[in-house]
Every structure is written in C-alpha cells, then in structure tokens.
Image (spheres, rainbow, N blue to C red):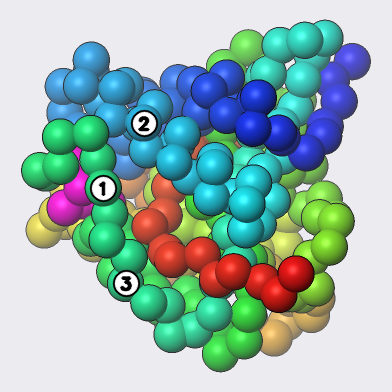
Amino acid sequence: MWTTRDATYWDIRPLAGVLAAAALPTMLGRWLEAEPVARGRQLFHHHVARTAEAIQYGAARIVENGDQVIAAALWLPCAAPCSARAVTAPDGGAFAAKLGELDAASRQAHEGQPHRRLAGLGVLPRWQRHGIASVLLTEDLAGVAEPARCLLAADDAVTAVALRCGYRPYGDPALLGRGSATVQPMLRTVDCDAVRVYVHAFAGKGNASFAGSDTAGSVSTACRPVQEAR
C-alpha cells in the first residue's frame, strides 16, 4: 500500500526524477523541448530546483510504495500580482524562454490574496488510475493557511482530475508558442462556487486516450515563491 509524506532534502533527486519522467511524454513536456534526451535532462534539472524551493518555502509531498517514490507534488506560496522570476535552465536558451512564457500565461490565475500554486505533479505510469493524483491535489498541507490553490491544466487528463477535486477554470485558456500548446488556469477555494468561470470553454489538446485518467503528468510553473515569516 502506498503512503504519503513530506519530502526532505534527501528526496530531491528521486522526486525530481519522478516529475521529469511523468512530464517527458506529455504535450507540455514536448512543447518545452522537442528532443527527448535533452527534454529529460532539462526537466530533471528544472524539478531539482523547484523541489528545493518547495521544501524551503512551500510543501513538497511524495508518495511511496515501500522505499520507491512513485508520485510527487510541489506547492509554492504565491501572492498576487506575481513577481516575474528569472528562469534558469542548464543551458538557458529556448527551454528557459518557454518556462518564462508558461509563467506569464499562468499569472491570470493569481488571486488578490496569498494562495498555493502547484509547481509540479507527477505519477509514474504503473501507478496511475489509483487515485494518487486526486489525493495529492486535495490533501491538507501542514502549516498552510491559504484557503485557495491554483494549477495549470495542460491537457484533458489534468482537467478531468482537477474538476473532480473541486478545481474550476479561472480565466481564459492561454495559448503557448503561437497556439502549439494550451494551458487552462484552474482554482480551488473553500467555496468552489466562488471561482470565477469565464464563458470560453477549455478544449484540451492532450491525447484523448488519457481523458479522465487520474494522473496529471507534470505541471511546472516559474513563479517567485514568497518567503513566509518564521
């Protein structure tokens, strides 16, 4: 039986490996980097940095089966408006530029009060459709006072899981790379009816065969974390 716990600094590399592996075949992963080997390397280094930030400023949760990390979620505290963050990548260039574009597309999801943003979510293929993503999206986070959480839905699978977990579309879908990829900001509050839904419906551009599956691959953002008072 799988169990969940907070990640420690010893978990950074295996956690980043799970998030990178989950993101590798996704539409968003392919948009970030077309070449598979370079994509895996860039995603891994990106999630190493994001995991360290989440452990320090937010929440990094892992799911284990025995001693194997099979899923993970990263949450970063954010305030609106979101300050632009200098995105770094091992060799910079297009990957870093696209992370910046992803960050810009996500800013409309920021409420006028502090909240938690999903900075990474991944479930290994063997463990998908077991309800793990739903648990990671809805579980109580120790020490988290913000009632709202937001994420970017990058395809139909993410959208379906998020809807079941009480997230609702917030704002219009954003086109990335001149329409080559689409992300939909989604928000979850204590009162789901309070979420502002625009008239434009989201039509995910992911693989339809994954629609409704309980996995979100990986969602990565580039928002500056807000250091909380200690």
Which amino acid, by three-letter code, is at mark 2?
Answer: His
- Please indicate, yes or no, whether residue 57 appears anywhere in the rendered image: yes
Q: Position of residue 96 (x, y in %)?
A: 20, 47
Q: Position of residue 38 (x, y in %)?
A: 20, 21
Q: Is residue 93 above or below residue 124?
A: below
Q: Residue at x 42, y 77 (%)?
A: 82
Residue on which disc 3 sits: 84
Which amino acid, by three-letter code, is at mark 1?
Answer: Thr
Is 151 positioned to the left or the right of 202 in the image?
Answer: right
Residue on which disc 1 sits: 88
Q: Mark 3 and mark 2 in contact (Cβ < 8 Å)? A: no
Is 139 positioned to the left or the right of 118 in the image?
Answer: right
Q: Secondary structure at mark 2?
A: helix
- Label 1, residues with CA under 10 Å away: few <14, some 14-19, many ≥20: some
Residue on which disc 2 sits: 45
State the CA–CA distance, disc 2 to disc 1: 10 Å
Is 184 positioned to the left or the right of 91 in the image?
Answer: right
State the CA–CA distance, disc 1 to disc 3: 12 Å
Q: Earlier in the sequence, mark 2 or mark 1?
A: 2
Q: Residue at x 56, y 90 (%)?
A: 112
State the CA–CA distance, disc 2 to disc 3: 20 Å
Q: Position of residue 39 (x, y in %)?
A: 25, 26
